[in-house]
Image (tube, rainbow, N blue to C red):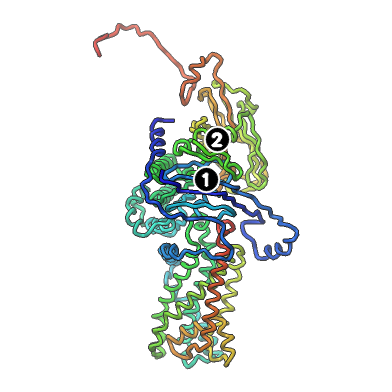
Amino acid sequence: MPPQADAAVAELAGAAPGRVAQPWVENAPRHRWRPRVDPAELWSERELALILALKDLKVRYKQTFFGVAWALLQPLVGVAIFTAVFGRAAHLPADGIPYAVFAYAGLAIWLYFASAVSGAAQSLVDNRDLITKVYFPRLLAPAAALLPGLVDLAVSLPVIATFMAIWSVAPGYRLLLLPLWVLAALVTALGAGLLLAGLNVRYRDVRFALPYLLQVWLFASPVVYTVSLIEGGWRYVYALNPMATIVTGFRWSIAGGTPPGAEAAVSAGVVVVALLAGFLYFHRVERSFADVI
Amino acid sequence: MAGSAIQVRGVSKRYRLGAGPYLTLRETLAGLVRRGRGDPGGEVWALRDVDLDVDGGEVLGVVGLNGAGKSTLLRILARITEPTAGLSRTRGRVGALLEVGTGFHPELTGRENVYLNGAILGMKRREIQRRFEEIVAFAGVERFLDTPLKRYSSGMYLRLAFAVAAHVDPDIVIVDEVLAVGDVQFREKCMGRMSQLGREGRTVVFVSHDLGAVTRLCPRTIWLEQGRVREDGPSAGVIERYIEAAAPRASRVEFEPQPDRRVEVLAVAVTDARGRPLEAPRRDMEVSLSAEFLVREPGPPLDLAFVVQDRLGRRLLDEDWGVDTGDELVVHDAPAMYEARLTIPPVLPAGEYVVVFWIGNDYDTYFHREALSFRLLPLPDDPQWAVERDRAVQPATTWTVTSLDVAPRRAGGER
């Protein structure tokens, strides 16, 4: 052994650790259904969620010609089609709101929800490298996936405002409730996203099934039609789909029309149950992510 | 002593072997039906009842053959995966370096990647800002900070990746083989940083196939065998016995079949230039190292390397076929058998040597282990005292000492 290596080893052996004692962090088999969550840890790692979300945003439109314009193109094309088919051809009622404004408001919040759900569902599989190589609270991956869509949503708001100006739709104080609906959409997407993300690690079927699920869900939500088409007690059944209430509420905040009624309580209950179920399932399968992903 | 930094108690880890890394729903449904008839996949215990205590500031080496459970142990220490049974606990911030450049994104610039990678490795934004200059200087990529990573050379990429990882500032550093990549200069730099971390009082757990590096860096080593701790003690002794067990002294060693691998090494041997086993090689002979291997499937081109080490794990020769010849083994028709032979001119002194064989490529290592050891005999007329001298090489040299027919000038004039 060369002399300098001897010295290095001697120094290593006698090195005085100059660090303050910290609490122990344990890694042991977890109880299947008893969540072990550390809110303090999640909070202290919030920066990582933001940075992952920021990465998604930065990467998304790299090497594209239209860049961020894509965030507008998607809803604009949707609105054009919906207006032509459902507004002009089928003459669907729109609560007295010009159909283009009606469709845009509904589609904007729906597209946010859809992108958040599919982002969260893919978040673990897409971050495979991270999951198998570093520790971080796994919950952060689907949580971070909820954020980029918010930017697209924010970008579409001025366009909706322009539409409203063109068709002379006046805003009101109900606009103040807008963040509530966005938050509700985010929480709903988190519940569904957690379930799907956990499933996706084991069954890649999720990736293929998801577009169909979202397609069906879109038409099960009042995006192209108004909730006032549904009569009496059926509204409560209809509200089992939380997006029914959220789309209606979001659109009402922006452009008026029918506000959500008492059936919103049903939606709120479903959201709480879905969030809880998603959370428990995620926790249950979380321990094997790094092994099976 | 600052007390324990790592405690592992009775840790076991079971992996299920199945049809593949993940199942489709159809397979699970089929599995539910089949469940009564027993699980066809089977299972493996990657770790079995492992106990380990590492004190704060200790530098621990981990050695073992492929599949002995080294990586699984690191993943459990780093909380990447959960043990099936037992408990592992750590005190202080853990920095796991299981791969350099985790989470790097090719479309982002060097600067953006430093922030991204730093955050992934557990640094706060402010910490990264504070150490940014240092990281960039360590990597030497100042001029390319605003260039997308995909335009970096692989050397620059590695340097930047290690630079971030090396500045994470953890209390416990867990390192798996990352030092095996890159050029010599880069490896030296990494090793330097590792021993600096040790001197600063960090706890280091270091897994490597480079036994010389383990001996140099780590006062203590554990030896894992089939998921259990076979030995735990001062590095020199553990590594010597590990080499003895891993590389038996023989002119030819055959290995257990590995039917699930793309490349299977059947045997490694010490032969003469014509391929006949050499029972008693002498230091004045050309010695050949040969490896027979079977390639089961076509795939990315292969490269191979022989390393000759002394008993302390010091590398005396490290011959890489791809580097030496610029060739690579492209396999079109598989399965196919090959023999690789490296002939070494008579340069090594008499003594005991360990042969390491590696076969793989940038994506995968198919075989990498101490294969056998052999004893190079002295010449019959080498005196014993001359054999025992410490030297690295002993080629056939030529001496001339001639008497000069000139009178010494200024003899005794200089002091």
* Residue receiving disc 1: B52
Query: Could you tell me residue B269's position as x and y percent?
Result: 62, 31
Precedes in sequence: disc 1 or disc 2? 1
Q: How many marks?
A: 2
Specify the amino acid type for callout 2. Phe
* Residue receiving disc 2: B306
Q: Is residue B180 above or below residue B90?
A: above
> Which chain is indicated by disc 1?
B
Which quadrant is home to the C terminus of chain A? bottom right
Task: Give the residue displayed 67% in from the left and 42% down from the top.
Answer: B257
Q: Describe the element under mark 1 as helix, strand or loop.
A: strand
Around disc 2, counting alpha carbons within 10 Å, would you say few (fewer than 14), some (14 to 19), or many (20 or more)?
A: many
Q: Describe the element under mark 2 as helix, strand or loop.
A: strand
- Residue that sits furthest to the right in the current view: B37
Q: Nearer the viewer, mark 1 or mark 2?
A: 1
Task: Give the residue displayed 48% in from the left and 61% down from the top.
Answer: A137
Query: Could you tell me residue B385's position as x and y percent?
Result: 49, 16
Task: Give the residue displayed 61% in from the left and 31% down from the top.
Answer: B248
Marks 1 and 2: CB-CB under 8 Å? no
Specify the amino acid type for callout 1. Leu
Question: Dividing the picture into quarters, in which one does residue B23 lie?
Answer: bottom right
In this view, the residue in front, B137 or A292, is A292
Task: Give the residue displayed 58% in from the left and 66% down from the top.
Answer: A33
Q: Is residue A55 visible?
A: no
> Which chain is indicated by disc 2?
B
Q: CA distance from mark 1 to mark 2?
A: 33 Å
